[in-house]
Image: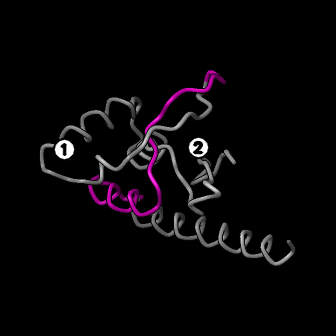
Amino acid sequence: MSNIKLFESKKIRSSWNEEEEKWYFSIVDIIEVLTDSTNPQVYWRVLKKRLLAEGNETVTNCNGLKMEAPDSKMRMTDVADTEQLLRLVQSIPSPKAEPFKQWLAKVGYDQQIDYNLKAKHN
């Protein structure tokens, strides 16, 4: 299930993995929200290289997933689950980091409630 989540009126592409019971979020969308970067793809490339050079395993665990791009085409984008995102957010200096972490926790909590309600009715 793929959809758009809003954080401070900015779109974040997300996908719910039913088997793993977890959300995956577009990393470049998160970077754009946290940094207000005009080119979040370049920011992510530079950050990824820096984190890899530091031996940070979070980047290694990020996967690619096809998501709808702004041009309405399905394109591969790096995604991360909630745990990975929390680690990445620590590497991005941003005054929005704390509100974003709270938002991320709420998204996960709301999904878990929805999942439990569906399980009860089936």
Q: Residue furthest bottom?
A: 120
Q: In the visual, does 11 lie left or right of 79?
A: right
Q: Please identify the quarter of the rendering in which residue 19 is found.
A: bottom right
Judged by depth in the image, the label closer to the viewer, 1 or 2, is: 1
> Residue at position x 50%, y 69% from top?
102
Q: How is the image coloured?
A: one colour
Mark 1 is surrounded, within 10 Å at the Cα level, by few (under 14), some (14 to 19) or many (20 or more) other residues, namely some
Residue 13 numbered tag: 2
Question: In the image, residue 55 lies at what x, y percent?
Answer: 14, 51
The amino acid marked with disc number 2 is Arg
Q: Considering only order in the chain, which callout, 2 or 1, is on the residue closer to the N terminus?
A: 2
The amino acid marked with disc number 1 is Leu
Which residue is identified by label 1?
Answer: 52
In the rendered structure, which segment of residues is drawn in magenta? 71-96
- Measured Cα–Cα span from mark 1 to mark 2: 24 Å
Mark 2 is surrounded, within 10 Å at the Cα level, by few (under 14), some (14 to 19) or many (20 or more) other residues, namely many
Q: Please identify the quarter of the rendering in which residue 122 is found.
A: bottom right
> Residue at position x 46%, y 44% from top?
79
58, above or below 46, in the image:
below
Does the segment drawn in magenta span residue 113? no
Q: Please identify the quarter of the rendering in which residue 44 is found.
A: top left
Viewer-side residue, 107 vs 55: 55
What element does badge 1 sit on? helix
42, above or below 34, in the image:
above
> Residue at position x 44%, y 51% from top?
80
Viewer-side residue, 15 vs 86: 15
